[in-house]
Image (cartoon, grey):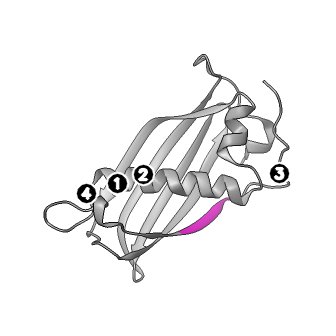
Amino acid sequence: MSNVNPPISVPREHQTDIRVRYQETDAQGRVHHANYVKYFEIGRVEMLRASGTTYRQLEQSGLLLVVVDLKCQFFAGAQYDDLLLLTTRIKRSRGVRIQHTYDLTLDGELIVRGETTVAAVDPEGNVVRLPKWLRLDS
């Protein structure tokens, strides 16, 4: 596995604005629940980009991050054209796994809370250790 130019630091928290697109809504005019999982992925990808590395570079280095666990709680819904704020946090990152938490708010109100665990694998699907720069041992 070739190396990615490791960033100086990986942020423990990152915020991303998400504008709800029409095609993400259901017949009731609300964001379909499956789209929140996509929003979580946007949060992880943008957090990595904020560290100075892209997910594409990570894949090209031979490291893939696959979702192995997902939790989602819904408190309220969002509608077309709402501007949401997604806060992505690293809860734990060591060994082969990274746990992220997500708070999605609309006008300061929490509407969705989520958590994912991703595991590091090589292109053949074998579990591999996270590179040191991605491990936050605390």
Q: Quadrant of the N terminus?
A: top right
Looking at the image, residue 38 sits to the left or right of residue 128; the answer is: left
| Labels 4 and 1 touching (C-beta < 8 A) | yes
* Residue lying at 34% horizontally and 54% vertically, measured from the top left: 35
- Three-letter residue code for mark 2: Lys
Q: Earlier in the sequence, mark 2 or mark 3?
A: 3
- Three-letter residue code for mark 3: Pro
Label 4 residue SS: loop
Query: Mark 1 highlights which residue?
Result: 35
Instruction: Measure the alpha-carbon separation of dots 4 and 2.
Output: 11 Å
| Labels 3 and 4 touching (C-beta < 8 A) | no
Query: Mark 4 highlights which residue?
Result: 32
| Labels 1 and 2 touching (C-beta < 8 A) | yes
> Relative to the observer, which residue lies in front, 106 or 114?
106
Looking at the image, residue 15 sits to the left or right of residue 79; the answer is: right
Q: Which residues are magenta?
A: 12-16
Query: Mark 2 highlights which residue?
Result: 38
Q: Earlier in the sequence, mark 3 or mark 4?
A: 3
Looking at the image, residue 52 sits to the left or right of residue 28; the answer is: right
Marking on residue 7: 3
Among all residues in the image, which is located at the extreme front? Answer: 23
Label 1 residue SS: helix
- Three-letter residue code for mark 4: His
Rendered image quadrant of residue 107: bottom left
Disc 4 packing (10 Å; few <14; some 14–19; many ≥20): some
Label 3 residue SS: loop
* Residue lying at 45% horizontally and 50% vertically, measured from the top left: 115
Disc 3 packing (10 Å; few <14; some 14–19; many ≥20): some
